[in-house]
Image (cartoon, rainbow, N blue to C red):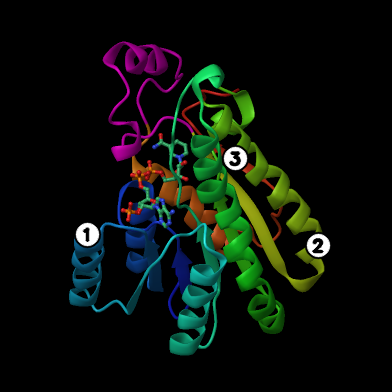
Amino acid sequence: MDFTGKSVLVTGGTRGIGRAIVEAFAEAGARVAFTYRSSSDQAEALRARLEEQGVEALVFQGDAADAGAAQEAIDGVLEAWGRLDVLVNNAGITRDNLMLRMSEDDWDAVINTNLKSVFNFSKAAYRPMMKQRGGKIVNISSVVGVTGNPGQTNYAASKAGIIGFSKSLAKELGRRGITINVVAPGYVETDMTAAIAEKAREAMLGAIPLARPATPQDIAGAVLFLASSHADYITGHVLHVDGGLAM
Ligand code: NDP
């Protein structure tokens, strides 16, 4: 897939899936901007690596749950590159607990980071993409948003919310040539899943028909497809990239 000359913004690009998405777009010729919240060293290291490879890169620090920070990032991309071809809403967190013990803070943090952020960035991208008469938004949900998972009511609600949001926006923006699609990863080995107990990990692996966890690159490949011209006639779709976990 060739993204030469395209400008791409990825939220939460410093680690895990987001970083793999940033690197895959860079490899495919795009100019890549990414955001992060707190890991400045990793952000600077990634930017330096991309620039060494001759890739134009922009970095924005800010909380994705903050509408002002989202607007600043989109404005920054437009100022530097004049357009935004692809937006990938990837930033996300977990704050797992059984419902009885889940605090209001844990609920709010997950809903705001995972779901409100998608609203923030999509809203800021809406006008520029409409003016360009085209654009692609890819939102990262989760298998848990489709199947549910005990201890993750907040996370599952945020990820199911992303699916409803994306289908609605796909219907609003289809006539403008803008597509909105969703990638729903299964179990991916990143910092987010590193704390899962060995027993739970084995149980999860046992339920995956392809019998291995996903790599961040497996997810990035699906994102690039949905952001490419090969997917011009696909919108409002939820692409499961989970080794068959949620059939
Ligand atoms: P990681 O924890 O490895 O990375 C999360 C990234 O999001 C980091 O770059 C982090 O920035 C950024 N981020 C977190 N909160 C914010 C915030 N408030 N504002 C801006 N950036 C933020 O997660 P993964 O790579 O595992 O997950 C990426 C996405 O994929 C998430 O949406 C997650 O829900 C989803 N997903 C993951 C699965 C998995 O198995 N790993 C499965 C299904 C979905 P910083 O480095 O500064 O903290």
- Residue 132: where, in percent of width, then height? 66, 82
Element type where label 1 sits in the image: helix
> Quarter holding the C terminus?
top right
Q: Which mark is residue 158?
A: 3
Q: As shown in the figure, which amino acid type bears the numbered disc 3? A: Ser
N-terminal label among 3 and 2: 3
Q: Residue 177 in the image: x percent, y percent? A: 73, 70
Relative horizontal placement of residue 166, taking residue 149 as reference (left or right): right
> Dot 1 corresponds to which residue?
42
Q: Are marks 3 and 1 in contact (CB under 8 Å)?
A: no
Mark nearer the viewer, 3 or 2: 3
Quadrant housing residue 4: bottom left
**Can you say whether 84 is above or below 44 in the image?**
below
> Magenta part of the protein: which range?
186-213
Q: In terms of secondary structure, where does tag 3 sit? A: helix
| Residue at image mark 2 | 172
Q: Is mark 1 within 8 Å of ligand 1?
A: yes
